[in-house]
Image (cartoon, coloured by chain):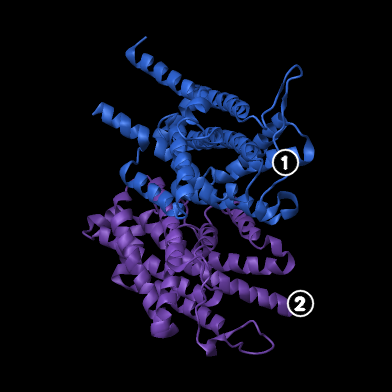
Chain colours: A blue, B purple
Amino acid sequence: MTAAQVRRLAVLAAIWIALLLAPYWMVPLGGYTALATRVLVLGLAAMSVNFLLGFTGVLSFGHAAYFGLGAYGAGLTLKYLAPSTPLSLLLGMLLGGVAGAILGALIVRRRGVYFAMVTIAFGQVFYYIAFQWSSLTGGDDGLRGFSRQPLDFGFLRVDILANANNFYYFVLVCFALAVGVMGFILRSPFGRTMIAIRENERRARFLGIPVELHIWIAFTLSCFFMGLAGALYALVNNFADPRGLHYSQSGDFVMMAVMGGMRSFWGPLLGASVFVILQDYLSSVTINWMSFVGMLFVLVVLFFPRGLLGFVRGRGRA
Amino acid sequence: MTQLLLFNITNGLIIGAFYVLMALGLSLILNLSNVINFAHGGFLVIGGYIAYTVTPYLGFWGALLVAPPLTAVIGLAVERVLIRPLYGRDPLYSLLLTFGLAFIIEDGTRFIWGAQGKPVTIPTFLAQPLSYEFFFITGYRVFMVTLVVIAVALLFVLLRYTRLGIRIRAGTLDLETVAALGINIRMLRSLNFAVGIFLAGLSGVLAAGQLGLEPTMGTGLLMPSFIAIIVGGVGSLTGTLLGGLAIGVASGMTAVFFPAASEAIMYVLMAVVLLVRPRGLLGEEGMMT
């Protein structure tokens, strides 16, 4: 093994150990387990956005829509269909992914800023649906009246409702599965093609790669991951909020990805943890937290455009 | 029924006029600088609140004269300090920056002027309906639409006949060549940005008189402006004009038959346009890709 490989393994091990032990080191540091769960879920969302943004080079600014659809899908399943946590996750993920597949087909021919504009505008459709269709979705108040259900393996029942640690580990398992699949895709020939498109779309096209098809598949996949993250988020809060579909939420996700470092796989998770913890802290100390979050956007764009990881790596190389 | 329909079409046209004013500014900035200005709604709010602040001293007419240029000056400063370093970088960054800026502006207005809505007094003779049969056509609405028409006409004259306008249009097509001809494109972009923000400020004053003021009002008007640009076709200001009116009237008419869908109809319209004519009504081939 080369030194670089050893270092990568060490980093990977450090990340997973930190995640595995999070409930035990976050609480003494002044956090709480639910905060760790939220970091994990929003981190998954930011990584899904980055799957598209950082690895295909396509800027979607409307991904909150698929996140929110996942949340509503899970919530509606639990409320009206069946009291089953796995089923709600599955259906939430499907709802987000299928909606992404359909809209993606309309969007993939656009590029750059226009892609961003069209994704924002289409994302807002679901916001208005959730907002207006109050009989089903609860409208402005959000969807309430459901809660995550104990996991039933036949021989073992795990209570994830009352026990925050159990729920954290359940989310961690889902997160690990999703992230594993994501990493696998990125390492496959398909993932390499995505990166080729990011690096030079025209050359990829000359090589005979069907660029639109690849972008569409990447878009759809990232919407599936987004749907899963949204479904998990509904379980975290036992609540689905129309503001989770709004484009300002999409902006937060893109920000997490950029702040962490969008060229790296784990960057968005780092960005999400900084963002979530900062927001949690700011909203507890000042009512003007929006200004601070806004300033964070401005500062990151002006001074850390390559994100925290990009900054650290740039330092190391120089 | 006819009156109801007429009422809503008028409403649609008036709200469409707002969208047009907003969207034209956005479109100007987008075409020349490749920046999606998320803070455009914020500048509208700034324009409105400046008008609110100066009305007690200068009256409504004074506010109408003073607020848009002041907003443009603020816009100029923002462009100079925050946005100029981002030209030539991935459009992602200007998008995120203006997105954060929109947060700051919304929170800032709430901090300075309070979260409660503020009314802006308009001259009494403008507040009267013109006739009893068509009670909804107040003098203010006629005045507003007239002003929007004048502003749009002036903008097109500026772009068609003045040196600045010709340079802006040339820069939209090929900025590199314009720069090579010895034109200061930094200055060009700044002025162009200021013109766009001026329009946002103007719509802010007009909106303040019609709807009253709230710190969040800008966000609500931003999305329709995006749709107006996409429907009309990116790169074409005439297209943006048509797009704004089209979605205004479409949502006005939908409000008659199915009020809950009056927002959704804009998105439906956009989806149809993207399916049938991906470059938008008057967009140039290749501009959207």
Q: Within 10 Å of the Cα at label 2, are there few (<14), some (14-19), or many (20+) other Cα atoms?
A: few
Residue type pointed to by label 2: Met
> Quick one: quadrant of the C terminus of chain A?
top left
Q: Is residue A95 above or below residue B78?
A: above
Placement of A125 over or under A152, stated as above or below: below
Q: Which residue is mark 1?
A: A146
Say whether residue B236 is visible.
no
The residue at the point 70 percent across, 41 percent down is A75
**Which mark is nearer the camera, 1 or 2?**
1
The one nearer the camera, A241 or B197, is: A241
Q: Are marks 1 and 2 on the same chain?
A: no
Q: Chain of mark 2?
A: B
Q: Amino acid at mark 1?
A: Phe
Where's the N terminus of chain A, which quadrant? top left
Instruction: Give whichever of A77, A221 is nearer the camera.
Output: A77
Q: Position of residue A213 (x, y in %)?
A: 55, 35
Chain letter for the residue marked with disc 1 in the picture: A
Q: Position of residue B174 (x, y in %)?
A: 33, 55
The numbered mark at residue B1 is 2
Where is residue B202, by image quadrant? Answer: bottom left
Provide residue A155's location: percent of width, then percent of height. Answer: 75, 16
Q: Secondary structure at mark 1?
A: loop
